[in-house]
Image: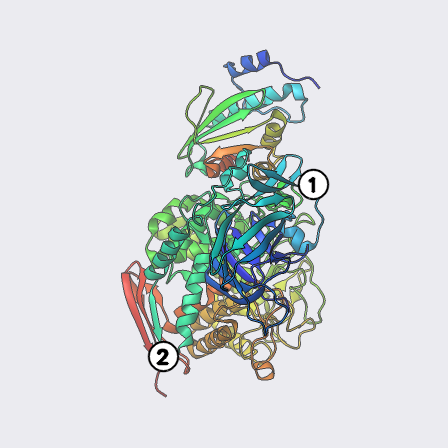
């Protein structure tokens, strides 16, 4: 298991260090100062008299702020230290770090304080895939700053480091000679700057950092976070962990906010730390959807940003097609040199229908018909893409197949290469039409019809979409059903074969409503069977399938967001008790992760491990895991907008005696929801 | 490879010639014909009038093509107006002729070029990137 780390972040800048505040990254560790998908600092080590201090304690006070309390290494824990060190670090356009050193004894002392600094300017893809750099690294001292730089042709990135107390600077760091009288204190503020978006793209020389300016906007951020949590609905519950889980979700969601240039002033959820601090179509849409009852405003920014980037042309390198909604945007070196297609990359077959789903769902909650009218053209282009480019082999189902090797092999949410497998463990053929995408398409057509009728004054389109949805549902229940196994196929592959593994995907079908009533009970039975349900949650793939692996990324682990969508699906079909059971398992799992659900955890049986086993390289915080408790609360309380009202129809698990949420925002203004466990 | 003279650029900037058949010439042309290609692109753009894909973008992008000329593309709820008369711009983008020819030919991606530093973009960057939508 990896060593414990401390992460702070702001926008798309984040800093991951060890518990002493130090960064000593190997090429493959996700430690460092990252911005624009690039590591701007890979070494940042504080030493006092040549040794690395010991950690007393570490606080990540806020998502953008951390404090490290240290003492110089004495070699033994039995000797009290005479010197104490505090590092206080705030993220923002890089980071600002205050270092305070106190002499605790009645005699003077002399100290050599050193900050070793280095930057490898690795693209996140290089960190992930262990690739080597193609350009030149350089270091120089300029204008009282240590400049760490990297250049490759016209591509140039620099980190500027300056200090409020003059330091001796060399190409490898900053040094201070500190003399402290009895009980005296010394401090300096070090400013580590990375370029802003404007500087990055303007090609101008980076502005010299303003030394001594208080940590960039820390006060503004504190105020902003207060208003974020004050504006959100208030939750109280007799089950104590619920409040902490809810609080954690809200704060992490605030931390994951990304401010896209194409929607000035708006924020949307970035996908997750450390690998995915960027706009991801699928993650941003589903997280916005999970958060609708609590933080509805993110949905509008997500939709506007994705609309602004909607595909307009056929571009095989980027898997772009007219009307398609993007998969991912990246800003690093490999994207700049088109060694990766993320400028933006469109390799996702499910995001386009999900875009329609979110557009309609946000109107149902917020009553923002203006947005539905504003995005009419984009929504119609998305609906056209579904029928046209979406179905590449003309069999009536949306499928996917990348055009180039740099694209994604699997363009559904289970996007690892070995996720769409037969029950015997063998891989399926491209193009693949995974089941849940057909569910999303069904839902998108019905929601498109509702919007066409109510807001676009287009009854003909509405009628057509409803007919197509009905036809799709009929065909799907016939073509995807595997009679001998009693469940829906995971996909239909390029050879027209039903990919027969039992997977969590069947739960998404319930959410979309594409499952005929006659098959719904079978879905329920399979989802809650011992093969799929671990006791903590529903596994991505059922135990007993050929490729099942409880620590396989998409073939056996439990994904909290997957479970939240399935719980919503179970509730849609009236299985409220089972939905509550799934919700409770995930919420209980959260208590083992300091209330912060990871992206995924191992699929081991609950009665075997007694606690949910962490998945080795999972993202945390990760947006749709962060949004999971919010959607689960919606499921437990049975929150559903109907006309201008919010219906509350709760069904709580026994562990939660009562639950109350005040000031739920929406088209009704603000309203409250209260629930108590039903007797008997 | 012959570079275009300043005099030729001046002529181009003040050219009032318009493409009448609406066709774009082959982009695989030599360096010396790039200014013509670029001029034709902007001429064609000015004839488009309405561009629904940009109906939510409002503002003016100044394109400064090294050794070729400057164009101001004003976008207002989908109406596109191209001019060579200096005016205030919300976003200034600059690059050399080869890069711009690559961009309009679809061989170069605007965002990747901006990240790489071959296109410089200042002001409202979001507006600048929306220019990519004119290139389909």
A129 or A519, which is in the foreground? A129
Check disc 2 and report the residue beneath it: A238
The percent position of residue A631, horizontal first and vertical second, equals 43, 66
Please state if A233 lies on the left or on the right of A339 as rendered.
left
On the image, which quarter does residue A557 sit in?
bottom right
Q: Is residue A268 visible?
A: yes
Marks 1 and 2: CB-CB under 8 Å? no
A576 or A203, which is in the foreground? A203
The mark lying in front, picked from 1 and 2, is 1
Q: Quadrant of the N terminus of chain A?
A: bottom right
**Residue A135: assigned label:** 1
The percent position of residue A568, horizontal first and vertical second, equals 45, 69
Given the image, what chain letter belongs to the residue carrying mark 2? A
Residue appearing at x 37%, y 71% in the figure: A638
Please state if A378 lies on the left or on the right of A71 as rendered.
left
B55 or A517, which is in the foreground? B55
The percent position of residue A324, horizontal first and vertical second, equals 53, 48
Residue appearing at x 49%, y 71% in the figure: A594
């Amino acid at each position: 298991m990896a060593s414990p780390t401390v992460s702070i972040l702001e926008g798309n800048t984040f800093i991951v260090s060890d518990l002493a505040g130090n960064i000593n990254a190997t090429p493959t560790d996700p430690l460092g100062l990252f911005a624009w998908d690039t590591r701007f600092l890979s070494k940042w080590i504080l030493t006092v008299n040549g040794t690395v201090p010991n950690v007393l304690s570490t606080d990540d006070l806020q998502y953008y702020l951390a404090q490290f309390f240290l003492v110089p290494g004495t070699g033994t824990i039995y000797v009290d230290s005479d010197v104490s060190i505090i590092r206080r670090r705030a993220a923002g356009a890089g980071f600002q770090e205050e270092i305070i050193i106190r002499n605790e004894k009645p005699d003077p002392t002399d100290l050599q304080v050193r900050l070793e600094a280095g930057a490898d300017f690795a693209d996140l893809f290089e960190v992930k895939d262990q690739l080597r750099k193609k350009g030149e690294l350089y270091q120089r001292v300029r204008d009282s700053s240590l400049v760490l730089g990297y250049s490759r042709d016209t591509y140039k990135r620099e980190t500027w480091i300056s200090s409020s107390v003059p330091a001796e600077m060399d190409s490898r760091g900053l040094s201070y000679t500190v003399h402290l009288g009895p009980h005296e204190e010394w401090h300096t503020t070090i400013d580590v700057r990375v370029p802003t978006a404007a500087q990055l793209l303007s090609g101008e020389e980076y502005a010299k950092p303003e030394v001594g300016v208080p940590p960039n906007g820390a006060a503004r951020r504190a105020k902003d976070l207060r208003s974020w949590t004050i504006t959100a609905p208030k939750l109280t519950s007799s089950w104590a962990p619920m409040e902490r889980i809810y609080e954690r979700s809200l704060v992490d969601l605030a931390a994951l906010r990304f401010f896209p240039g194409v929607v000035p002033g708006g924020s949307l959820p970035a996908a997750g730390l450390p690998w995915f601090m960027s706009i991801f179509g699928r993650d941003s849409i589903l997280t916005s959807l999970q958060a609708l009852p609590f933080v509805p405003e993110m949905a509008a920014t997500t939709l506007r940003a994705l609309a602004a980037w909607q595909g307009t042309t056929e571009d095989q390198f980027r898997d772009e097609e007219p009307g398609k909604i993007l998969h991912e945007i990246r800003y690093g070196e490999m994207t700049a040199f088109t060694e990766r297609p993320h400028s933006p990359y469109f390799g996702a077959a499910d995001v386009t229908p999900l875009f329609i789903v979110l557009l309609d769902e946000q109107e149902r909650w917020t009553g923002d018909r203006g947005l539905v009218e504003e995005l009419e053209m984009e929504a119609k282009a998305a609906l056209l893409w579904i029928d046209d480019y979406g179905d590449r082999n003309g069999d009536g189902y949306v499928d996917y197949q990348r055009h180039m090797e740099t694209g994604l092999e699997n363009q559904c949410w289970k996007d690892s290469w070995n996720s769409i497998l037969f029950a015997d463990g063998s891989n399926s053929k491209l193009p693949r039409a995974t089941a849940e995408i057909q569910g999303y398409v069904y839902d998108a057509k019905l929601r498109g019809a509702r919007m066409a009728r109510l807001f676009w004054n287009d009854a003909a389109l509405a009628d057509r979409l409803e007919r197509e949805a009905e036809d799709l549902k009929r065909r799907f229940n016939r073509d995807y059903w595997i009679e001998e196994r009693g469940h829906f196929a995971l996909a239909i592959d390029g050879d027209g074969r039903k990919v027969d593994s039992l997977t969590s995907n069947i739960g998404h079908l319930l959410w979309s409503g594409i499952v005929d009533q006659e098959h719904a009970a079978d879905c329920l039975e399979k989802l809650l069977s011992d093969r799929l349900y671990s006791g903590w949650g529903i596994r991505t793939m059922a135990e007993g399938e050929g490729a099942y692996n409880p620590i396989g990324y998409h073939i056996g682990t439990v994904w909290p967001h997957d479970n939240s969508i399935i719980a919503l699906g179970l509730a849609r079909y009236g299985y409220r008790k089972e939905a509550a059971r799934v919700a409770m398992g995930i919420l209980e799992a959260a208590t083992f992760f300091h209330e912060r659900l990871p992206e995924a955890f191992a699929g081991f049986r609950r009665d075997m491990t007694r606690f949910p086993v962490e998945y080795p390289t999972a993202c945390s915080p990760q947006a749709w895991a962060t949004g999971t408790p919010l959607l689960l609360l919606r499921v437990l309380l049975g929150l559903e907008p109907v006309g201008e009202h919010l219906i509350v129809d709760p069904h709580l698990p026994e562990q939660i005696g009562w639950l109350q949420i005040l000031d739920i925002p929406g088209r009704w203004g603000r309203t409250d929801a209260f629930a108590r466990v039903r007797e008997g | 490879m012959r570079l275009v003279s300043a005099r030729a650029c001046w002529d181009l900037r003040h050219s009032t010639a318009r493409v009448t058949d609406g066709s774009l010439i082959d982009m695989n042309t030599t360096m010396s014909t790039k200014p013509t290609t670029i001029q034709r692109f902007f001429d064609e753009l000015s004839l488009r009038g309405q561009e629904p894909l940009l109906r939510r973008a409002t503002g003016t992008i100044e394109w400064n093509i090294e050794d070729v000329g400057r164009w101001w593309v004003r976008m207002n709820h989908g109406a596109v107006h191209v001019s060579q008369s200096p005016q205030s711009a919300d976003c200034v983008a600059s690059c050399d002729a080869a890069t711009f020819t690559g961009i309009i030919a679809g061989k170069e991606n605007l965002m990747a070029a901006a990240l790489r530093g071959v296109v410089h973009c200042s002001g409202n960057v979001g507006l600048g990137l929306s220019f990519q939508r004119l290139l389909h």
